[in-house]
Amino acid sequence: MSDTISEFVLSTLGELNYDTSGVTDSTPLGDGGLELESLSLAEVAMHIEQQYGVQFDDEELESIGKLTFGEFRTLIGERAQGPAVTGPAA
């Protein structure tokens, strides 16, 4: 499951014109890493909600920018439920 989530998030970031070629689990989403800003985080969160049914509130979005890619992927996996993990949310 984590590989599927990684692929989806990396693909989404690529669609938003972020260079994901060197991303590892320890790459920060914000400062010193991918440099995702609040608008980009909100857009990524929207895609994750559509794909996995996982929602993040505004406060969480601010703190997500402080996570590493691996921590973010784990958070998505922990919150994803049922068949939405392997396919788009209904």
Image (cartoon, grey):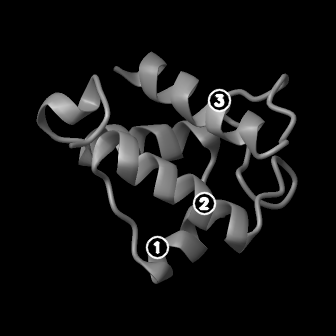
Q: Which element carries disc 3, helix, strand or loop?
A: helix
Q: Which sits earlier in the primary sequence, circle 1 or circle 3?
A: 3
Q: Is residue 90 above or below residue 62?
A: above
Q: Secondary structure at mark 1?
A: helix
Location of the N terminus (image quadrant): top left
Measure the alpha-carbon separation of dots 1 and 3.
Answer: 22 Å
Q: Residues within 10 Å of mark 2 (few under 14, many from 20)?
A: some
Instruction: Provide residue 67's location: percent of width, then percent of height.
Output: 60, 55
Give the CA distance from mark 3 to mark 2: 13 Å
Residue 28, how many percent across, how many down?
73, 48
The structure residue drawn at horizontal position 37% and vertical position 40%, both measured from the top left corner, is 51
Q: Residues within 10 Å of mark 1 (few under 14, many from 20)?
A: few
Taking the image as shown, residue 20 lies to the left or right of residue 88, namely right
Residue type at the position of mark 3: Ser
Q: Give percent across and percent down for residue 11.
A: 65, 29
Question: Extreme bottom residue here?
Answer: 59
Q: Give the camera-side residue of 11 and 60.
A: 11
**Front tag of 2 and 1:** 2
Mark sitting earlier along the chain (3/2): 3
Q: Amino acid at mark 1?
A: Glu
Residue bearing mark 1: 60
Tell which residue pokes out farthest to the front in this image.
90
Nearest to the eye among marks 1 and 3: give it.
3
Q: Which residue is mark 2?
A: 43
Q: Residue at 83% across / 47% down in the picture?
A: 33
Residue 11 badge:
3
Q: Nearer the viewer, residue 32 or 82?
A: 82
Report whether 67 appears left or right of 47: right
